[in-house]
Image (cartoon, helix red, strand yellow):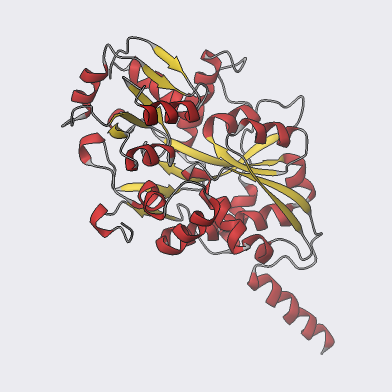
Amino acid sequence: MKFLKMVVIVLVFAVSGRAWSAEAVDITYGYHPYWTGGWNGVIIKHLKLHEKYLPAGSKVRFEAHLTGPPMVNALLADKMQIGTMGDMPSLVATTKRKIADIRLVSTPMFSNGQNCNKIVVPADAPDFASVEEAGAWLTGKPFAVHRGTCANRFVDSVISKGAFKPSERLSMTIEVITSNFESGKMKGGAAMWEPHARRVVELGHAKYAATGAPWGETDADFTLMRQDFIENHPEAATGWMKAEIEAMQFMINNPKQTVEILYEELTGYPRSTIWSAIYEENPVAIGGDPVTYQAKMVFDDDVITLAKNGYAFLHELKVLKSPNPPENFYNDWPLQTALSEMNLKAPIGDIMGKPRSTRPYN
């Protein structure tokens, strides 16, 4: 009888998804609240989803970062064990094996160029009927981009494809690009990621000219883990993936609650801007795709292609020594285990763009 009771208890814990006898962990998680691809980290933090899935007694310190490189450094130094960031710094992190073995473990955000690959122009620029018209206007004018980012990769690629020919390339941080739009100093165009692009548009300083979709330029966000963390704490690694999956489901199914949570975290972003940055449809004229945000999670052919292009781009910038991905640059065991135990298949779901008229905020 006692044996049967123990079996029942074990089954209850197994079904609940909560790690029972696994070792508690004390970790730091890095996330990027000012990047739509990293918003799942904000949801995990505020809903305390990590408490639901990590081994009992675990502790998590949430570190917000404005860019990816500081998170990469923290992961390499073992001051951070898990981080979620844009594609370019993520790829760099996987190439530092002499320092530490960092692996991509999931792709929480993937889109057809709807999040990072945004071209914006001053508000007084003409209203373009197509991306071709926008390209003609941009040709011969200065163009700004934050060096070494997903936006940089996108711009280099579309320029090589003949989308437009700027008079000069300006290397500026995303903050400087924003301030130049606000002050009226931006005379040409710039590439920006969300929600920064949406903010300058909503404030009336800029307008959208293109997404990456017309040129087949996709964008993504990755979650990374130290390989030794995965090996030493497999239950915790899997548990974190479960928390991330539930966070993505929440974002897809609960737009208003998601906006309220993000509003608490982001400074200078009204609810209307947050909603539009992720839930509003992008116009067809700029290359809008019906899906604004896909919780892809897995490393399918689309993601592998994006990663290979990213490694090659970083090599061209002389950031990396090799244009090729390192061996085993991703480890999807925690993700695949989580999906199996949750009886789910990837992609988890899509955020479909909605008309601006449905926005629940002024």
Q: Quadrant of the N terminus?
A: bottom right
- Taking the image as drawn, is residue 327 in sight? no
- Camera-nearest residue between 267 and 171: 267
Q: x and y percent of residue 303 in the render?
A: 47, 37
- Taking the image as drawn, is residue 198 in sight? yes
Q: Quadrant of the C terminus?
A: bottom left
Q: Residue at x 65, y 37 (%)?
A: 103
Q: Residue furthest right?
A: 2
Q: x and y percent of residue 9 in the render?
A: 74, 79
Q: Residue furthest front?
A: 183
Image side of residue 32 versus residue 190, left or right? right
State how many labels appear.
0
Compared with 221, 133 (above or below) is: above
Q: x and y percent of residue 335 in the render?
A: 60, 51
Q: x and y percent of residue 40 in the render?
A: 53, 52
Image side of residue 117 versus residue 298, left or right? left
Q: Residue at x 37, y 29 (%)?
A: 181
Image side of residue 13 versus residue 158, left or right? right
Residue 75 occupies which quadrant of the picture? top right
Q: Residue at x 39, y 34 (%)?
A: 218
Compared with 77, 266 (above or below) is: below
Q: Residue furthest bottom?
A: 1
Compared with 48, 318 (above or below) is: above
Q: Residue at x 48, y 62 (%)?
A: 250
- Camera-nearest residue between 235 and 179: 179
